[in-house]
Image (tube, grey):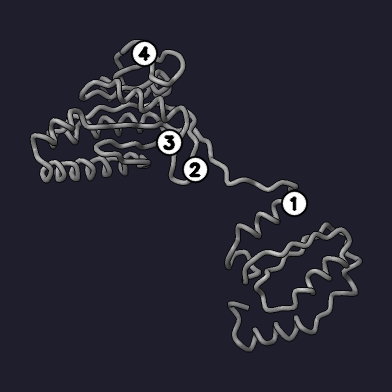
């Protein structure tokens, strides 16, 4: 009725008022869910009585005014339908998927900020951020977080992430900025815009071990991009703080 003309809406209301389904309700054999909203204008006994006449029907009364789930309060309606159909109500869970994580930060940022002063440092950071975001867009990277002078981004492919990190390194050098970057590929957990999981911790720890101007990756990334033409130098095995085991790391030499 929300999309009907006034005359059509009036006709639908007259039809609904005149229609009496009571004689056929006991004959319904299919499992039935009867939903109603507590704030609607109709007689609230009717849905309850209808559910009572349908064999093994389930009656649920929800708060709100709109009966149609695509108008308002869809989650509550869909939760009830999901539980009725599957026997369990889904949780607002997380989405786990494989991703390449990249962390970057500016080398010697504290000293540089001290030399430049607050205003010039702020302008330089704004230029840095603008350059990084343009390059992320170019390589289909997704910015997850920006903390101070560092970026955390995810990619759907490790080679693209490596190329992006190297492009950032080359571009921001024009601003007299040196960065370090760390990359790892693994399963991450997504909740809204947040990205968490062991892979994220690994990527952050790898970035912390990178030297100035270095793009450092785990052996996982190195193996996944074999055949891509990206060259690496072995940086040996390392212990990553808070992460079990030892990790073989590689520095990107050319792309």
Front: mark 4 or 3: 4
> What is the distance, in whole Å, between disc 4 and disc 3 at their CAs?
26 Å
Position of residue 123 relative to residue 228, above or below, is below
Q: Is residue 46 left or right of residue 162?
A: right
Compute the Cα span from label 1 to label 3: 34 Å
Does 63 appear above or below 88?
A: below
x and y percentages locating residue 77 in the rendered image: 66, 60
Which numbered tag is attached to residue 238?
Answer: 4
Instruction: Name the residue that disc number 1 marks.
Output: 85
Question: Is residue 119 shown to the viewer in this render?
Answer: yes
Q: Tell whether 133 sits left or right of 114.
A: right
- Distance from disc 1 to disc 2, alpha carbons, whole Å, reads 26 Å
SS label for mark 2: strand
Mark 4 in CB contact with mark 2 (< 8 angstroms): no
Quarter location, residue 44: bottom right
Q: Residue at x 44, y 38 (%)?
A: 195
Q: Residues within 10 Å of mark 1 (few under 14, many from 20)?
A: few
Mark 4 and mark 1 in contact (Cβ < 8 Å)?
no
Cα–Cα span, label 2 and label 3: 17 Å
Of label 1 and label 3, which has the lower sequence position?
1
Residue 206, percent across and down?
Answer: 34, 23
Residue 6 in the image, given as x and y percentages of width and height: 60, 87
Residue, disc 3: 156
Mark 4 or mark 2: which comes first in sequence? 2
Secondary structure beneath label 1: helix
Q: Nearer the viewer, mark 2 or mark 3?
A: 2
Viewport quadrant of the N terminus:
bottom right
- The foreground one among 133 and 38 is 38
């Amino acid at each position: 009725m929300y999309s009907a003309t006034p005359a059509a809406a009036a006709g639908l209301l007259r039809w609904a008022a005149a229609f009496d389904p009571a004689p056929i309700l006991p004959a319904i054999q299919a499992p039935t869910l009867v939903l109603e909203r507590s704030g609607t204008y109709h007689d609230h006994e009717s849905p309850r009585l209808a559910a009572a006449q349908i064999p093994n029907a389930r009656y649920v009364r929800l708060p709100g005014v709109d009966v149609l789930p695509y108008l308002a309060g869809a989650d509550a309606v869909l939760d009830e339908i999901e539980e009725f159909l599957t026997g369990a109500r889904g949780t607002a869970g997380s989405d786990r998927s494989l991703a390449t994580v990249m962390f970057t930060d500016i080398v010697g940022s504290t000293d540089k900020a001290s030399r430049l002063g607050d205003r010039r440092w702020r302008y330089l950071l704004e230029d840095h951020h603008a350059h990084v975001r343009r390059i992320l867009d170019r390589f289909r990277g997704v910015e997850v977080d920006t903390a101070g002078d560092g970026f955390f981004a995810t990619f759907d492919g490790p080679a693209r992430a490596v190329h992006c990190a190297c492009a950032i390194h080359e571009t921001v050098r024009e601003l007299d900025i040196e960065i370090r970057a760390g990359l790892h590929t693994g399963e991450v957990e997504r909740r809204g815009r947040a990205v968490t999981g062991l892979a994220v911790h690994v990527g952050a720890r790898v970035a912390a071990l990178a030297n100035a101007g270095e793009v450092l990756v785990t052996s996982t990334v190195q193996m996944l991009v074999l055949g891509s033409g990206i060259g690496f130098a072995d940086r040996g095995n390392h212990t990553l703080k808070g992460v079990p085991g030892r990790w073989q790391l590689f520095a990107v030499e050319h792309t």
